[in-house]
Amino acid sequence: MFTHTQNDPVRQQALTALTAAFIAQGHPADYAKQMAIATVFQADLELRNAQLARLLAWLQEAHPEIAIAANTLVEQTREEFERRVQQG
């Protein structure tokens, strides 16, 4: 489970509800729990992506002088991550 989930009641409630829903659909309990974790993780990724996109759009509008540097940093981070994934 996520290390921060136990201290986050919203995530814990989501995991509990999703696990119960997957079990009700006939999935085994262990599999249902993993499916719930994956679902919450995907939602977290989508939220973070939306937050970053909104921040970059705001920077472009309110602070165009640093928006280029911010976009460059985001791109460098992506490239570094891809290199690390490829290296294993």
Image (cartoon, rainbow, N blue to C red):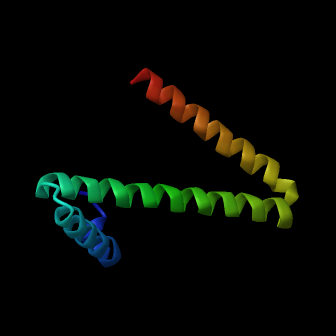
Residue 33: in sight, yes or no?
Answer: yes
On screen, residue 88 versus residue 5, left or right, reads: right
* Vertical side of 27 occupied by 81: above or below: above
- Measured from the top left, where is residue 71 in percent x and y? 73, 47
* 66 or 82, nearer to the observer: 82
Residue 2: in sight, yes or no?
Answer: no
- Measured from the top left, where is residue 67 in percent x and y? 80, 54
The image shows a total of numbered marks equal to: 0
At a point 33% along the width and 53% down the height, the residue shown is 38
At a point 22% along the width and 71% down the height, the residue shown is 16
- Measured from the top left, where is residue 55 in percent x and y? 69, 63
- Measured from the top left, where is residue 32 in percent x and y? 20, 57
On screen, residue 50 versus residue 10, left or right, reads: right
At a point 33% along the width and 70% down the height, the residue shown is 11
Q: Based on the displayed image, in which of its 4 quarters is residue 74 positioned?
A: top right
Q: Based on the displayed image, in which of its 4 quarters is residue 44 positioned?
A: bottom left
On screen, residue 37 versus residue 88, left or right, reads: left
* 42 or 23, nearer to the observer: 23
Q: Based on the displayed image, in which of its 4 quarters is residue 4 positioned?
A: bottom left
* Vertical side of 82 occupied by 11: above or below: below
* 54 or 69, nearer to the observer: 54
On-image quarter of the N terminus: bottom left
* Vertical side of 49 occupied by 11: above or below: below
* 88 or 39, nearer to the observer: 39
* Vertical side of 16 occupied by 31: above or below: above
On-image quarter of the C terminus: top left
At a point 60% along the width and 61% down the height, the residue shown is 50
On screen, residue 47 versus residue 6, left or right, reads: right
User: Residue placed farthest to the front in the image?
Assistant: 25
